[in-house]
Image: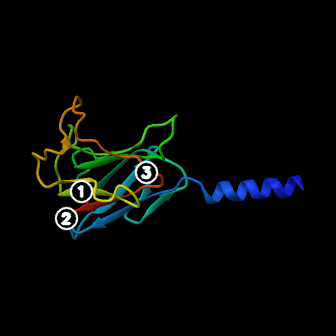
Amino acid sequence: MFKTLLFLVATVMAVNAEQHTVHFVNRCGFGTPTLIVGGRIVSTGGDFTSTGPIINAISYLQTGACGFNGEGCTTVGTSLRNPASSSPISSTTINLIPPHSFSVTTGFGYFNGCDGLGEDCTNANCPGAFHKPTDTFPQITCETNDVNLEITFCD
């Protein structure tokens, strides 16, 4: 009986586990979409799905001119997590703070919740991007469980 109860609890928890996906669209005709989480490359263009939060991820289009963390290129930084009293909400930004710089048109949008929220950066003067470390306004947040993110290059 006890083993059966533990199995049922584990099954329900697995079904209700937090999950997020980062999806890439590359319309540039060159380069490799890159996603780094925890200091390691977890995707080079394919969907990346995490069964838990994605914290401090960095993505960019590797054109051969980008450093490992996207130095020299436009980056999208994101943390995707379910809202809870002990953790912040999901937040995504476009980063042009040096040593990052505009490289290709880059945009993002949430889906599976907060649909329609996102940002597009079409030039180096992108008003919706971080340009200096003291910027705080360009963060696009979402308070939906299991929200996903689509990142598009050359949109």
| In the foreground, 62 or 129 | 129
Query: Looking at the picture, which amino acid does disc 3 mark?
Result: Thr
Q: Earlier in the sequence, mark 2 or mark 3?
A: 3
Secondary structure beneath dot 2 equals loop
Q: Earlier in the sequence, mark 1 or mark 3?
A: 1
Q: Looking at the image, is 96 positioned above or below residue 116?
A: above
Q: Give the residue drawn at x 82%, y 55%.
A: 5
Instruction: Tell me if residue 68 can be seen.
Output: no
Which residue is label 2 attached to?
155
Distance from disc 2 to disc 3, alpha carbons, whole Å, reads 25 Å
Q: Earlier in the sequence, mark 2 or mark 1?
A: 1
Determine which of the numbered discs, if any, sits on residue 55 in the image: none
Which residue is label 3 attached to?
144
Q: Residues within 10 Å of mark 1 (few under 14, many from 20)?
A: many
Secondary structure beneath dot 3 equals loop
Q: List x then y, in percent, for residue 28.
A: 21, 67
Query: Looking at the picture, which amino acid does disc 1 mark?
Result: Gly
Distance from disc 1 to disc 3, alpha carbons, whole Å, reads 20 Å
Q: Quadrant of the N terminus?
A: bottom right
Q: Residue furthest top?
A: 134
Say whether marks 2 and 1 touch (CB < 8 Å). Answer: yes
Distance from disc 2 to disc 1, alpha carbons, whole Å, reads 7 Å
Say whether marks 2 and 3 touch (CB < 8 Å). Answer: no
Q: Looking at the image, is 53 positioned above or below residue 133?
A: below
Q: List x then y, in percent, for residue 84.
A: 51, 40
Which residue is label 1 attached to?
107
Q: Quadrant of the C terminus?
A: bottom left
Q: List x then y, in percent, for residue 134.
A: 22, 28
